[in-house]
Amino acid sequence: MNIKRILKNILLYGIGIIIIFLIIWHIGIDEIIAVFSSMNIYLFLLAVLIYIITIFTIVMRWKSILQINEYNAKFKNLFLLSMMGQFINNITPSMKGGSEPFRAYYLSKLEHIPNHISFSSVVVERVLDTFVFLILTFFVIVYFIINGIIYAKELIFIWVLVGGLTVVGLYILMHKTLAFKITLKIAKIITKFSSKTINEDKIKESIRLFQDNIRFFNKNKRKIIMPFILSFGWWILDILRIYVSFLAIKCNISLVAISSTYLISLLIGIIPTLPGSLGTSDAVMIAMYSLFNIPYSKAAAGTILDRIISYGLATIMGALSYKIIKRKLNK
């Protein structure tokens, strides 16, 4: 089973790398190397620093959400869990999702926080992220429509789809019987591959506590203001990192072009494809930059440079964080 999984991951990563290589080969390897040779290393290191600050902002948001429930989790543990989340996102077929259940589970183990508190905290994070994402993307769509840029209709469709799925997801989570039925079905599937038995009463109680805690957040909207501001903060920092990456290769690009391309690539990245949308997202970003009259060589170099940070560095740091977490739990 493990061998099959390893072979599958190798195949998927191989496809992603091949896509990136084909893009580079089509644009011209010599042209891209020439762009990299003139790179400002200090600006690249500044982009790395912005990435680290972004992670700290995410950690502070998570910490503030937990403090609303009067749980003061250690900053170090939250940092390790957040990095682990980045790692999981990069090895699963999406760019920004998939790590929440893992982060919630290990948070509960490391900090001895009740499951319903830890899981509701990551759900609140996801809702805040989606809300900010929809707000920012709405302005991008309006910009596309005003300037007659193609793909505006497709973006509107995806935007409505993401918003609709979020509403449906929240409805299921907060429904008295639907949440229990779906959780029970998932639990039955899991038990087929393990020796554990299902305790339906315990599942019902866990769901009730989880839903009560989500309602608690809803009743304390003022306390969500700071996490909401931090959510905006980390999205802006993410966009700023890409902007600085392009400045490092001496590419004068507008923040509108960066923001539009970044948000659209995330919309595309929601569709499950390759691990971390490796290759597919890069192709979309390079194509989008061309709409803003950015030379293909600089578009490819800037995208690769940012991927080194957001994918390469994040994966390495995340894998190390996961090992540290496992070691802590084993002790």
Image (cartoon, rainbow, N blue to C red):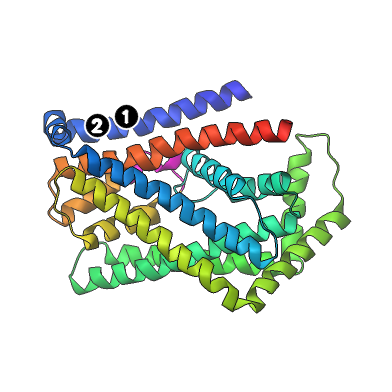
Query: Which mark identifies residue 137?
Result: none
Q: Is residue 36 above or below residue 116?
A: above
Identity of the residue drawn at 13% across and 36% down: 38
Q: Which image quarter holds the N terminus?
A: top right
Element marked by disc 2: helix
Question: Which portion, as a residue range, is magenta?
Answer: 272-282
Q: Which image quarter holds the C terminus?
A: top right
Q: Gap between marks 2 and 1, in whole Å? A: 6 Å
Element marked by disc 1: helix
Which residue is under mark 2? 22
Q: Amino acid at mark 1?
A: Ile
Comparing 264 with 245, the one in front is 245
Image coordinates for residue 192, horizontal then vertical, percent: 77, 37
Does residue 69 show up magenta in the picture?
no
Which residue is under mark 1? 18
Q: Amino acid at mark 2?
A: Leu
Contact, mark 2 vs mark 1 (Cβ under 8 Å): yes
Does residue 280 show up magenta in the picture?
yes
